Image (cartoon, rainbow, N blue to C red):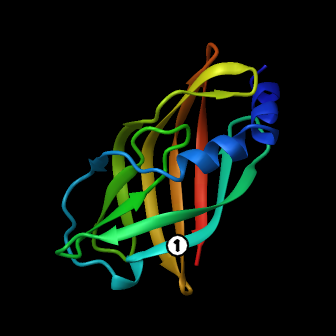
Amino acid sequence: MRPTLYRTFLSSSFVVISSLSLASCGPLFDSGPGTAPLNPAFNKQWSGTWTISLQGAQPSTLNGVLSAVLTSDGRNVDLGPICFGGGPGTVRAYQDGSENAHWVGSLVCAPASFGTCPSEVFTLAYANALLLNNGISVLVQGSVTGCGATSTFDMTFTGT
């Protein structure tokens, strides 16, 4: 039953709902202090493509933006909005000695209606951002729950 639900969701209301929720940020969810300064090139409003892959469903893509704002000491970057369905949508990722920034935690997005399910909740657990060839790549992972089922998802943003 889950693949049919998500095919309906991804083909119809996903783009509309996601576009609306990507337009607003909520409270910040911090994962800790960075150990060294990040590359200043992170600090930008990126335009690109979001792709979401839910377990048992075909991936779906949409155009969007991602804001990456370095903290004053340059050791953390605030990434957002990354919450589908509204609600809080910014996480503070930190540098851990490599060229990427990551966040680990639990960010519960506001419930949203998808396809035939009146209420789905995305819970983000991990985010990783990496600068690549004058662009950015961000991976967000977590789970989605609704209508008596839970599955995992991967969401990626590729931007310039």
Q: For residue 160, which quarter of the picture?
A: bottom right
Indicate the position of residue 3 as horizontal and vertical percent values: 79, 29
Q: Nearer the viewer, residue 155 or 159?
A: 159
Quarter in which the N terminus is drawn: top right
Indicate the position of residue 138 as horizontal and vertical percent values: 52, 63
Indicate the position of residue 72 as horizontal and vertical percent values: 19, 74
Q: Residue furthest top?
A: 148
Which residue position is annotated with label 1? 46
Rendered residue at 67%/39% (across/down): 54
Indicate the position of residue 17 as horizontal and vertical percent values: 64, 41
13 lies above or below 150: below
Q: Residue furthest bottom?
A: 134
Q: Is residue 18 left or right of residue 22?
A: right
* Label 1 CA crowd tier, 10 Å (few <14, some 14–19, many 20+): some
Q: Secondary structure at mark 1?
A: strand
Rendered residue at 54%/51% (across/down): 22
144 lies above or below 100: above
Q: For residue 108, which quarter of the picture?
A: top left
